[in-house]
Image: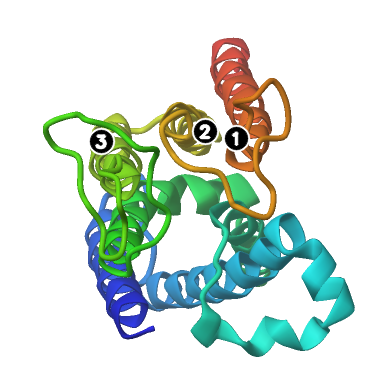
Amino acid sequence: MRWYGLMYIIGFALAWWLAAKRAKREDINWSGEQVSDVIFYGALGIILGGRIGYLLFYKFNEFINEPSIIIRVWEGGMSFHGGLLGTILALWYFAYRHKKSLFEVTDFLAPMIPLGLGFGRIGNFINNELWGKPTDVPWAVLPPGATQALHPSQLYEAFLEGLVLFLILWFFSARARPLMSISGLFLLCYGLFRFVVEFVRLPDADIGYLAYGWLTMGQLLSIPMMIVGSVMILLAYKKQRTD
């Protein structure tokens, strides 16, 4: 928990700093109060949604039999896909309160999210969890207590979902873009990166592969993200051409 707490603090602090910098642009023009509020709502959505989503997606039977495990956060367990849904709900409420459209809010916040994801994956690596499959690549890691070297899949995700996705979104959003296109690009790229890394990441032991001897829960949850993200981008640019 100490490492996760530190990573969350770093992620939220960076998001707030970048959001404050981004809010000063003439084509955006958010107030300092709105920036603080949206980071608060986003953080709440990530934490609550991530915890509830983990229990529903990965520990459903245990959760049904013993609902009290929702508060046993010291045992670990956060889901990105649950955190995403929680964040969308939180940002919808923020948008309603501040009389903004949901996509105006998500387009503003999307470029700041990847760095937090990247630090979270570094937390996974430090906590010795979510390892990849056995491998003999030169950069393989022998975790404490393991008998085989493994893919450091947490670092792959930190690089792709964190640094690479941040650079893509930050430079893409450096000038005005059609409403919804930045949010769509986030969903498409995250889903793609997560889907690819899952090929070298070990599935959850109590779930295993869902089909074909390779399909994981992470991949199954990423497929709708890629589809929805692609559709959002197409609709955004189609609407721009017709306006």
Nearest to the observer: residue 2 or residue 25:
2
| 20 w.r.t. 211: above or below | below
Q: Amino acid at mark 1?
A: Ser
Whether pointer 1 and pointer 2 mark residues with C-beta atoms closer than 8 Å, the reply is: yes
Q: Which residue is mark 2?
A: 191
Secondary element type, mark 1: helix
Query: Residue 106, how many percent across, how many down?
Result: 52, 50
* Residue at mark 1 to residue at mark 2: CA–CA distance: 5 Å
Q: Amino acid at mark 2?
A: Gly
Q: Amino acid at mark 3?
A: Val
Q: Residue at x 43, y 54 (%)?
A: 130
| 96 w.r.t. 197: above or below | below
The answer to whether residue 99 is visible is no
Q: Residue furthest right?
A: 65
Please rate how many residues cluster around mark 3, counting C-alpha atoms within 10 Å: few if below 14, some from 14 to 19, many from 20.
some
Which picture quadrant has residue 214? Answer: top right
Nearest to the observer: residue 41 or residue 123:
123
Query: Residue 205, how many percent across, how many down?
Result: 60, 52
Quadrant showing the N terminus: bottom left
* Residue at mark 2 to residue at mark 3: CA–CA distance: 13 Å
Which picture quadrant has residue 73? Answer: bottom right
Secondary element type, mark 2: helix
Q: Residue furthest front?
A: 147
Q: Which residue is mark 3?
A: 164
Secondary element type, mark 3: helix
Q: Is residue 75 left or right of residue 9?
A: right
Specify which label sits upstream in the sequence, 2 or 3.
3
Nearest to the observer: residue 196 or residue 75:
75
Q: Which residue is mark 1?
A: 222
